[in-house]
Amino acid sequence: MSSLLKLGHIFNHYEGLLLAEFNYLWIVLQGIYNKPELREFVKEMISGKIKSLDYYLNFTLEASQEIKKTTKYDSIREELQQELYHLDRQMASLQKMKRELAKVISSPTSVVQRGSLVITNKARFYISVSLGEFFFKGDRYYAISLESPMAQILLGKAVGETFELNGITQRIEEIY
């Protein structure tokens, strides 16, 4: 391979890196980390889960009412009652999550608190409700509650600080 061709490959490599950095800065400036949009997205996810669970709850309730009242079907009725109990608990949890999300602020924060969007060198954490992993605008996020071990470590920290959880060290790069 000629030195000119090698130089061309090196230039293309660095040009690609610079372009990636420029794209990253452009995306940040354009507001990819738009907390009101993120909050609305999480709210819609919770509402969607509530709607799906409500449908399943009603379906299971109707099925339990259609089972004949004979001893032959006692075990099936008991299983359906247990399922209804679990579904009711899940619904109560989702309703609580929806109420908790209403308390989450959308304004920018300088230190980590409820409502903060924390960008580390390894992940993006939205301190809000215990929804877990989700994807928003093509990026992976973790919605975590204030009670989670990760949130407890993050609370009060600022940009540039590091922390460790489960042997993994992370650095806070941005807080919104």
Image (spheres, rainbow, N blue to C red):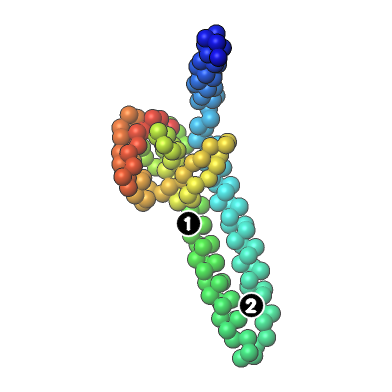
Q: Is residue 67 or residue 12 the one in the foreground?
A: 12
Say if residue 29 shows up in the picture: no
On residue 64, the disc is: 2
Residue in the picture at 67% in, 75% down: 63
On residue 39, the disc is: none
Residue in the picture at 46% in, 45% down: 143
Q: Is residue 109 or residue 28 the one in the foreground?
A: 28
Q: Amino acid at mark 2?
A: Ser
Q: Position of residue 166 (x, y in %)?
A: 32, 47
In the orientation shown, which residue stands out farthest toward the top? 4
Q: CA gap, disc 2 to disc 1?
A: 27 Å
Say if residue 35 shows up in the picture: yes
Q: Secondary structure at mark 1?
A: helix
Q: Position of residue 9 (x, y in %)?
A: 54, 16
Looking at the picture, does residue 3 appear above or below residue 43? above
Looking at the picture, does residue 72 appear above or below residue 154? below
Q: Residues within 10 Å of mark 1 (few under 14, many from 20)?
A: few
Q: Position of residue 125 (x, y in %)?
A: 43, 40
Looking at the rendering, which quadrant does residue 114 occupy? top left
Task: Give the labeled residue for mark 1.
Answer: 96
In the orientation shown, which residue stands out farthest toward the bottom? 71
Looking at the picture, does residue 52 appear above or below residue 3? below
Q: Are marks 2 and 1 in contact (CB under 8 Å)?
A: no
Quadrant where the C terminus sits is top left
Q: Secondary structure at mark 2?
A: helix
Q: Position of residue 10 (x, y in %)?
A: 51, 15
User: Looking at the image, is mark 2 or mark 1 earlier in the sequence?
Assistant: 2
Q: Amino acid at mark 1?
A: Lys
Q: Residues within 10 Å of mark 2 (few under 14, many from 20)?
A: some
